[in-house]
Image (cartoon, rainbow, N blue to C red):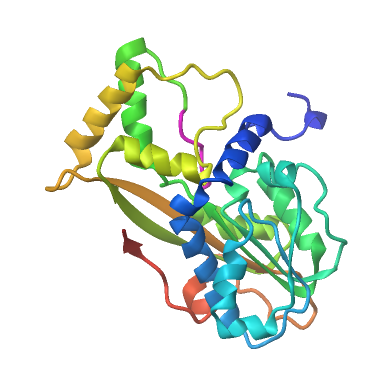
Amino acid sequence: MSPSSGPPRIFDVQRRAARLERSERTLSRADFLHARAAENAVGSLEALVRDWPEAADLSAHPGAFETALAENPAAARVGPVKIVGDRAARAEPGAAPVELADGSQDLIVSLMSLHWANDLPGALSQIRRALKPDGLFLGTLLGAGTLKELRAVLTEAELEARGGAQARVSPFADGFDGAALLQRAGFALPVADVDRVTVRYPGLPALIRDLRAMGETNALAGPVRPLTRGILARAAQLYAERHADAEGRIPATFEIVHLAGWAPHEGQQKPLPRGSAKMRLADALGVREQTGET
């Protein structure tokens, strides 16, 4: 690839847009991750005593943030939340210029969307440019440990049947790289935290139904060889053998990486030297860390 050709195309934007369109009709059946991410973002705002008159939502599924905000005292300090971008823009964050003027926003939120960016640093840089000095970005994306059980059993089942296997689960970013990504994009005082959630299902079909409802199924670029019923049945068998609890339920791990960063401003405190940070995102924002199992 030549230096001028841009970042690698990890995701197929048309495939992702089709998944997103379908999920707009089904998300309400499986919106627990979006609701959790929104509640965390709103909790962060509640701890910060200031006003946010210009606010924008770049989330793949906009609306969860406003719903959570409406039930929180912080709503009185946040102006009308603008929903930015059409479905195509939400399908590939950062691919087109964000529809916000530079230096125009006090607050930008992007929930459960940025893990689909082909150019994540570029998408974050656009967000930072749209913020006013000392404006705040709150974001969440799925992290590297997400669906680790599913990734393993699908790979093994396909290897057994075909002698080779395609990637079926996205290569999510490592949550511990979150602050570095924000810093690379020009944010000040970047912090990141990882919320690990285990959801239990009666079986593999139920997990796949939820992933489809969320719009989080495979959208990797390149030709896709469909999985046969036999491969899926073998994957379900492996999943149950290795992970099922005493009641036969299988766990699915999700990592929600929470990001917070500020547009630089001369009045901000100076960052600590690299490697000296001792505070997690939950502590820095004065909120209770969320962990749990469903």
**Residue 178 versus residue 137: which sits nearer the camera?**
137
Classify the position of the N terminus by image quarter: top right
Where is 172 relative to 159, above or below? below
Which residue appears at 48% of the width and 44% of the height? 213
**Residue 216 versus residue 151: which sits nearer the camera?**
216
Which residue appears at 46% of the width and 18% of the height? 226
Q: Residue 79 falls in which quadrant of the image?
A: bottom right
Horizontally, is 52 left or right of 173 in the view? right
Give residue 134's position: percent from left, percent from top.
Answer: 76, 76
Most extreme residue toward the left, as rendered?
246
The magenta stretch is: 168-173
Q: Is residue 155 visible?
A: yes
Horizontally, is 203 left or right of 282 in the view? left
**Residue 164 versus residue 183: which sits nearer the camera?**
164
Most extreme residue toward the bottom, as rendered?
49
Which residue appears at 51% of the width and 50% of the height? 27
Which residue appears at 69% of the width and 86% of the height? 50
Label count reads 0
Give residue 274's position: percent from left, percent from top.
Answer: 58, 65
Does the magenta-highlighted stretch encompass residue 111? Answer: no
Horizontally, is 260 left or right of 39 in the view? right
Dominant secondary structure of the magenta stretch?
A: loop
Where is 260 relative to 87, above or below? below
Give residue 255's position: percent from left, percent from top.
Answer: 43, 53
Most extreme residue toward the front, as rendered?
25
**Residue 264 versus residue 226: which sits nearer the camera?**
226
Does the magenta-highlighted stretch encompass residue 171? Answer: yes
Most extreme residue toward the right, as rendered?
101
Q: Is residue 276 visible?
A: no
Classify the position of the C terminus by image quarter: bottom left
Give residue 152's position: percent from left, percent from top.
Answer: 34, 32
